[in-house]
Image (spheres, coloured by chain):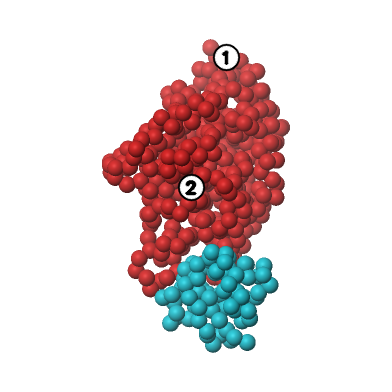
Chain colours: A cyan, B red
């Protein structure tokens, strides 16, 4: 199972994206962004384990701006 | 106490509001949007939930367009001072609260000018004409109260918004007296900014307010600082809502506001308006039958009014009437100028003020009848004194 982060400019977009993915049956979790990635994010990110590309596509189509993605070693 | 000072702030608050405030202070009162621990995450979720519910209330598609403020005045200041710069012109109605008039007076000293468009009682066409005639080449912003906080008269804000769109002018509505009492939908609306209190018709705690941004032309931020986001960046984030929410937010207030919004959505705003208007009409009818009571408007109806009544007793200072209602009848009203001297000037009550009574969802017919019988007694007592 992959651990992929999707980063945003505000925690409001993180939660909005989480709800959007949930409505599309994709599970994600709000987590703190690792410090080495924080200059690209609001401090929180969305951790997506499965269907990452599909999740990105859904978020992109909704118009919520994504500032970056990263693969991480979260437990 | 029988409370008719709901125009200043609604009281009592729903139990769910009290519980939510209490829960934050006792159980999960961590700083939201700052940390990763469970309590901070719960706090952030409360704020997000409130944004979502406010977005639903005002029928706007994006929770990030809901900005938490301390009150409606702060929200109005964000818009007025964030939009208007030296050389700009603004238009306001003749019924504005000091929350609009004073920031503009302040800006007059910084090269901003403004004009006043007269409200035309019960004649929306004429009111629109007055706004159109007040627009200049350098008009950048029109600010208008949705309803007078003193006399309850509504202004045709959707039509003024459409007028502003034609002229390419931003439009801001002061909905302090209408949010939660009158249905407001920003979907397909030309209203660019909606400012409101959280502690009046939305039944949240005092110290809460909302700025709803329905345009891409966002005001400059007046306050910069920590937002919990983009911390390594020196400049203020431009993204909403962080752009306007520096510093630790009023989480207990926002949690209460969230429950207040849910409360009125459960009750249904159309039904709230209908019931409060019925009570207002009952009060108006009772007062109109009392010798010596001065009323300043026609009989209120939902087309032109929100549930607010202003009156005076002939020969009695408005503050004295309020003091007698308080001391002898245990009734709370607000007298004086209600921070809206422009509206009082328009109705020629700037020297006397008025006594204002405003309904809430907790007001009932017995209270209205007790209130009007108290006014009758005071009026009769006054007559006997002469």
Q: Which residue is mark 1?
A: B383
C-alpha separation, residue under disc 1 versus residue under disc 2 = 48 Å
Residue drawn where x is 52% and y is 55% of the image: B66
Where is residue B271 drawn, in percent x and y? 70, 40
Under tag 2, what secondary structure? strand
Q: Nearer the viewer, residue B308 or B17?
A: B308
* Residue B38 against residue B351 in the figure, above or below: below
Q: Quadrant of residue B373?
A: top right
* Residue B88 against residue B126 in the figure, above or below: below
Few, some or many C-alpha atoms within 10 Å of disc 1 (few <14, some 14-19, many ≥20)? few
Q: Nearer the viewer, residue B361 or B191?
A: B191
Under tag 1, what secondary structure? helix
Inspect this view and state whether residue B261 appears.
Answer: yes
Where is residue B204 drawn, in percent x and y? 58, 50
Where is residue B212 drawn, in percent x and y? 51, 51
Residue drawn where x is 54% and y is 64% of the image: A63
Inspect this view and state whether residue A48 appears.
Answer: no
Give residue A64's mark: none
Q: Which residue is mark 2?
A: B193
Same chain under badges 1 and 2? The reply is: yes
Residue drawn where x is 38% and y is 50% of the image: B82
Chain bearing mark 1: B
In the picture, the quarter occupied by the N terminus of chain B is: top right
Between tags 1 and 2, which lies in front? 2
Q: Nearer the viewer, residue A2 or B386?
A: A2
**Which of marks 2 and 1 precedes in the sequence?**
2
* Residue B263 against residue B303 in the figure, above or below: below
Residue B176 is left or right of residue A25, and the answer is left
Residue drawn where x is 62% and y is 67% of the image: A20
- Count of numbered tags: 2
């Amino acid at each position: 199972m992959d651990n992929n982060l999707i980063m945003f400019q505000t925690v409001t977009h993180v939660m909005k994206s989480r709800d959007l993915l949930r409505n599309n049956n994709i599970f994600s979790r709000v987590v703190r962004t690792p410090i080495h990635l924080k200059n690209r994010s609001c401090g929180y990110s969305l951790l997506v384990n499965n269907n990452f590309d599909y999740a990105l596509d859904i978020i992109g189509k909704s118009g919520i701006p994504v500032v970056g993605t990263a693969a991480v070693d979260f437990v | 106490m029988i409370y008719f000072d709901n125009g200043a702030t609604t009281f009592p608050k729903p139990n769910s509001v009290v519980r939510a405030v209490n829960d934050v202070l006792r159980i999960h009162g961590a700083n939201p949007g700052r940390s990763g621990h469970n309590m901070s995450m719960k706090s952030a979720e409360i704020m997000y939930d409130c944004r979502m519910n406010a977005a639903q209330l005002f029928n706007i598609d994006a929770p990030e367009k809901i900005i938490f403020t301390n009150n409606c005045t702060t929200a109005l200041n964000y818009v007025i001072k964030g939009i208007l710069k030296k050389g700009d012109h603004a238009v306001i109605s003749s019924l504005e609260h000091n929350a609009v008039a004073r920031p503009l007076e302040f800006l007059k000293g910084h090269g901003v000018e403004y004009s006043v468009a007269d409200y035309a009682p019960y004649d929306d066409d004429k009111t629109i004409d007055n706004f159109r005639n007040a627009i200049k080449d350098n008009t950048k912003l029109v600010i208008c109260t949705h309803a007078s906080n003193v006399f309850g008269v509504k202004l045709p804000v959707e039509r003024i918004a459409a007028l502003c769109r034609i002229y390419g002018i931003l439009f801001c509505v002061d909905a302090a007296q209408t949010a939660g009492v009158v249905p407001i939908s920003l979907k397909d609306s030309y209203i660019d900014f909606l400012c409101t209190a959280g502690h009046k018709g939305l039944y949240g705690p005092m110290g809460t307010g909302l700025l709803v941004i329905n345009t891409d032309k966002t005001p400059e931020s007046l306050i910069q600082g920590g937002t919990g986001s983009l911390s390594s960046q020196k400049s203020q984030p431009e993204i909403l809502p962080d752009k306007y929410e520096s510093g630790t937010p009023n989480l207990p207030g926002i949690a209460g506001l969230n429950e207040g919004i849910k409360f009125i959505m459960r009750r249904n705003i159309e039904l709230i308006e209908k019931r409060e208007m019925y009570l207002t009409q009952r009060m108006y009818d009772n007062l109109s039958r009392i010798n010596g009571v001065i009323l300043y408007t026609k009989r209120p109806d939902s087309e032109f009014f929100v549930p607010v009544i202003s009156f005076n007793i002939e020969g009695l200072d408005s503050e004295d009437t309020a003091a007698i209602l308080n001391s002898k009848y245990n009734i709370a009203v607000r007298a004086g100028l209600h921070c809206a001297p422009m509206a009082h000037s328009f109705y020629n009550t700037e020297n006397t003020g008025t006594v204002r009574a405003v309904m809430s969802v907790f007001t009932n017919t017995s209270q209205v009848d007790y209130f009007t019988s108290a006014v009758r007694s005071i009026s009769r007592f006054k007559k006997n004194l002469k």
